[in-house]
Amino acid sequence: MDLTTLTYIVVGLSFALYIGIAIWSRASTTGEFYVAGKGVNPVVNGMATAADWMSAASFISMAGLIAFLGYGGSVYLMGWTGGYCLLAMLLAPYLRKYGKFTVPEFIGDRYYSKTARIVAVICLIFISFTYVAGQMRGVGIVFSRFLEVELLTGLIVGMGIVFVYAVLGGMKGITYTQVAQYCVLIIAYTIPAIFIAFQLTGNPLPQLAFGSTVNGTGDYMLDRLNQIVTELGFLEYTTTSKSTIDIFCITLALMVGTAGLPHVIVRFFTVPKVRDARSSAGWALVFIALLYTTAPAVGAMARLNLTETVQIGAVGDPEGNLKIEERPDWMTRWEATGLLKFEDKNGDGRIQYYNDANADFAAKATEYGWAGNELKVDNDIMVLANPEIAQLPNWVIALVAAGGIAAALSTAAGLLLVISSGVSHDLLKGTFTPDMTEGQELMAGRVAAAVAIVIAGYLGYNPPGFVAQVVAFAFGLAASSLFPVIIMGIFSKKVNREGAIAGMLVGLIFTMGYIMSYKGIFIPVLIENVPANWLFGISPEGIGVVGMLLNFLVAFGVSKVTAEPPAHIQHMIEDIRVPKGAGSAVDH
């Protein structure tokens, strides 16, 4: 059976499974729509949280980042997993004990202000739409390559599937759909990794193959990778070009951004008891670890396979580079998507792949007769192309396509539901039309989700960057806007509504402005994105840490010169933190 037909069958069966679950678990009340009736088992919730968390950035883009950044890509592994420790210890149990539906609802009640709730919704919408743009781009990439359709067609199909199980099932439908999607994505990620690890090293465990010797050479994989990339003018795979301050800030921004992401936090509102929230975070880490401990090996193997596909002989040997007419079929297929390109700059009929930005390597390149790097590979294709590069069976490639779509759709659904609840529950029911019935609120939530899906599709068609880059921006926005006010709301009785509102606005505006200035998201690039121009040497991916600090400083500063929170609010904060009664939620 040819690859396209097989992919349609595998992806079609996964779609049928998701829609079937959505119909079976259709939400009939607002409680089921927003928080799945608060009755989800912590193990199930941990698996759903892992799927919600392991987005297209984790499945598609992270290993691609590690493949090209090498050791420098470890900031994403450390940041994205470390955030769950913060969630488990500092946020999840207390927010679950509070017992409401959404993060803005907690912020509105804690800071006794509808304005604070509205500002929180605005922050939530900025974060969620920035994040969902990356997910929809991931959907488009997978569809355009494996189903061989136009990007727009692929996005419309993906939007339709999400519409069915997000709008129909709400959080209840999304939870059980995400469990199925986790199973699909983890199988799709690990099976190719096992195949390729065994193929390269004879060791089927990717985590161990990462430190094993390459078959037939006696060289350790990382030593071989270091040798071949440095011969082509690239930085050693086991080193990084990032400064210490930037590594620290990116890692911290991703950690606190994780803890401040509304679509992740809301998952801990779905369990029956407070202790289940902490348990869910632990289980989520276990399920996430299965993929995250595999990703470094996948990245290294992908980089080695790609480089050796193009550099077939000794570097500098006229016969050492791949002939254009002999390039493998997988390259031709990815060329059609526009995510892989080559240009024969020196007219020798071969493809040269090297670092032409390295001035120290320029003399050697001239000596070899090379006129510039001739191969451009998008970071986001490495995991998807890896099985093809390694010439694995078609069923494995089809499974990877289903896994990539599952990863993107699972997170997109969670984000869209957060946007929907922010509009229907926090803005309409909680602020502007408090007299609306439960049925009207449920309908408003579904309409809001439908509108959000359309906007998300547009952002996927016109993305502001590659998947992991866009997602990193969302984490920066979460770190600088929502995380500080949630932490202060739980652990400080000093911060009042004026401080919280000012802090959120300053953090959000500063971080968004910095990112837009360097990256040109929605506006032209205003400042060249080079380390020499970065504030304190911090890149746009890590600037959320500065925004977070500004948020804290402004919130405490404004609170100090304005009236302290009312006595009942201070008592409420004590109730949230007190261990007594932690077995069940407390309604205020």
Image (spheres, rainbow, N blue to C red):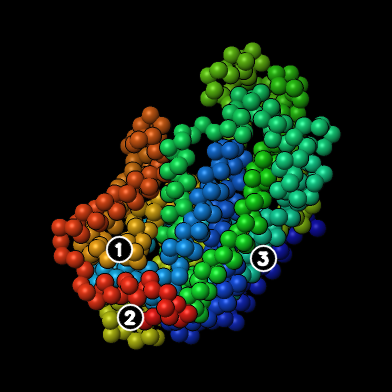
Label 3 sits on what residue type? Cys
Q: Nearer the viewer, mark 1 or mark 3?
A: 1
Kindly state the secondary structure of the residue where label 1 is placed.
Answer: loop
Q: Which residue is at a point 75% across and 34% down the rendered structure image?
A: 220
Q: Is residue 137 above or below residue 570?
A: above
Identify the amino acid type marked 2.
Answer: His
Which part of the image, by quadrant, shows the N terminus?
Answer: bottom right
The answer to which of 544 and 527 lies nearer the viewer is: 544
Disc number lying in front (1 or 2): 1
Residue 144 vertical position relative to residue 209 in the rendered view, above or below: below
Q: Which residue is mark 1?
A: 492
Q: Position of residue 5 (x, y in %)?
A: 74, 59
Q: Residues within 10 Å of mark 1 (few under 14, many from 20)?
A: some
Give the class, few, some or many, for how many residues have Cα within 10 Å of label 3's Cα (few <14, many ≥20): some
Label 3 sits on residue: 183
Numbered disc 2: secondary structure = loop
Q: Does 53 appear above or below 240?
A: below
Q: Residue at x 60, y 37 (%)?
A: 70
Residue that label 2 marks: 588
Residue 383 x/y as whole percent: 65, 48
Residue 461 spot, x, y in % from top left:
48, 53
**What whole-number distance in Å separates the C-alpha atoms at marks 1 and 3?**
40 Å
Measure how far apart labels 1 and 2 are at the Cα level: 18 Å
Nearest to N terminus: mark 3 or mark 2: 3
Give the residue at x 58% y 38%.
71
What secondary structure is found at the residue carrying circle 3? helix
Query: Which tag, 1 or 2, sits closer to the chain's start?
Result: 1
Tag 1 and tag 2, C-beta contact below 8 Å:
no
| Front residue (pair 354, 286) | 286
